[in-house]
Image: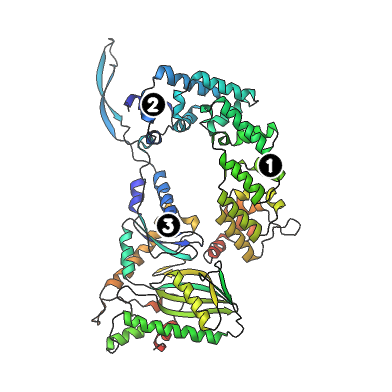
Amino acid sequence: MGPGGLARLHGLFAAYKPPGLKWKHLRDTVELQLLKGLNAGKPPAPEQRVRFLLGPVEGSEEKELTLTAASVPTLTDHPLVCGPTFTSLKVGVGHRLDAQASGVLVLGVGRGRRLLTDMYNAHLTKDYTVRGLLGKATDDFCEDGRLVEKTTYDHVTREKLDRILALIQGSHQKALVMYSSLDLQTQEAYEMAVRGLIRPTDKSPMLITGIRCLHFAPPEFLLEVQCMHETQKQLRRLVHEIGLELKTTALCSQVRRTRDGFFTLDDALLRTQWDLHSIQDAIQAAAPRVAAELEKSLRPEPGTQQLPGLGRPWDSKGPSSGLGLESCAGH
Amino acid sequence: MFPLLMQTFLELLQGLDLSKIEKQPDAANLLLRLDFEKDIKQILLFLKDLGIEDNQLGTFLTKNYAIFSEDLENLKTRVAYLQSKNFSKADIAQMVRKAPFLLSFSVERLDNRLGFFQKELQLTVKKTRDLVVRLPRLLTGSLEPVKENMKVYHLELGFKLNEIQHMITKIPKMLTANKRKLTETFDYVHNVMSIPHHVIVRFPQIFNTRLFKVKERHLFLTYLGRAQYDPAKPNYISLDKLVSMPDEIFCEEIAKASVRDFEKFLKTL
């Protein structure tokens, strides 16, 4: 089982990081569980060695001791002598999540770590659900930070919130076009913009491709954000700034990643499933999708000159397909 | 290592983990200098007399291989001392099995330790004996964490002495638990779940479980509206049922939901 198990352990899979757990601890826990599973398998048969043993020859009446050759198992491979077969595994983490955020966290094992870099270069979007609370402001934009300000929020309505979210999306769409180094006057670029395939070429600040309000019950509101190149702190700062735009204050009570590229909540493994078999099954289940998506992302798109083909129809995936139309209304 | 010695060890003592012993710096020198007839055989026979079975000798010696360099007379004196304190033969065997370093401690040290536990916890002689038999590593470990934990229970968490005695007789591990984890668990259970002291005393297992488990299950029950921890009200859920059961039984009997619902809920946290 040992060598066979390790062979099936190359690729990408997604785990659900619960809030309050550091991503490094999650990575270490996954590594320990995988090692436990691999070392629990049947060890290979010990090597045999030919040794000359001193013993009486059978079937003879004389009591002479002669050397006979015999094949004896050696002790050099015995697990109680050398220790367990597997002592470390290389597990890499994709886009990180800070301790208070939760959600889909992509991990790569063995050869899958190379695919992590490919995923990073493909500039895929991520989906977040962000829960906000009106009326308070803290210094680190979270609920347990030091309280800075308290305001009223009776004047806030759903329409005002939607207007502000549309403004944000519009400005980020302009930034997206700027960072993608596309000339929007050409026909191909326009078609790509219509289909929502514009992607930045290299490093850029946080870019929001879509944002909308799912639920509004003052003082609580729930936003769904599709973005890339973000950190969770910037998302919390965004909630704070939305509060400021609404002439009140807001803080962020929950940041949860629901999708990272092509890994969704359904693919994410819970804490009880972080063992060898479930991870192997998850890697195998995700492998064809991963290969297809990365090949599509890195293949040059026909008809464009500037972009080396970073297109992927993001509005066909994920729950918010209606945002594809709004992205054009932004400019 | 001489192959003969290695082979003897592996054949006689199934379970003796040489890889772990090799990691210690002076182990190899010590073991090579031993003579089988004089030292090893006597001590192995002595341990078997004590009541340790053949298959348990391996795990014992992996931890305390240094017992081979002890004097046999000293070991016999220490066992006689324990018997004089009214520990039965089976008790001594169990203690030595669970805490392999016990017999390497001198009589004065064992005496001091037993006296400390009797004075600090103010338990009767019989209860101290039961406590030590259940968790013999109290005698071999350091006493500082125990003193700190007692202060934490008394001053920081606000338990009275008889409450602490009751909890410790049920779950001796609480004496050596991590201070920070104790305070975090107590903070969540007392302040967020609003469970008063006298209910916590009845179920000290809550200090023995991981905090995330308590949090996840409590949040699930609150979501379903079944988070009732007051014994006087109907639909009461006791704390030991909250934490000690595996997921399937918890979901079926306590939460009255399916495991899939629990998993879906966990993904919304």
How far apart in space, not on screen, are marks 2 and 1 (Cα)?
43 Å
Query: Which quarter of the figure is the N terminus of chain B placed in?
Result: top left
Circle 1 packing at 10 Å, graded few (<14), some (14-19), many (20+), is some
Circle 3 packing at 10 Å, graded few (<14), some (14-19), many (20+), is some
In the rendered structure, the answer to whether residue A89 lies left or right of residue B181 reads left
In the rendered structure, the answer to whether residue B7 lies left or right of residue B168 reads left
Task: Please determine whether, in this image, residue A174 is positioned above or below residue A103.
Answer: below
Marks 2 and 1, the one that precedes in the sequence: 2
- Most foreground residue, B130 or A65: B130
* Badge 3 amino acid: Lys
* Badge 1 amino acid: Gln
| Residue at mark 3 | A24
**Residue under the image location 55 percent in, 36 percent down:** B137
Task: Please determine whether, in this image, residue A49 is positioned above or below residue B266.
Answer: above
Give the percent coordinates (x, y) of residue A143.
Answer: 56, 69
| Residue at mark 1 | B165
| Residue at mark 2 | B30
**Residue under the image location 43 percent in, 19 percent down:** B39
Q: Do the residues labelled 3 and 1 touch (CB within 8 Å)?
A: no
**Residue under the image location 47 percent in, 56 percent down:** A273
In the rendered structure, the answer to whether residue B148 lies left or right of residue A226 reads right
Give the percent coordinates (x, y) of residue B197.
Answer: 70, 52
- Most foreground residue, A72 or B106: B106
Chain at tag 1: B
Circle 2 packing at 10 Å, graded few (<14), some (14-19), many (20+), is few
How far apart in space, not on screen, are marks 3 and 2 (Cα)?
40 Å
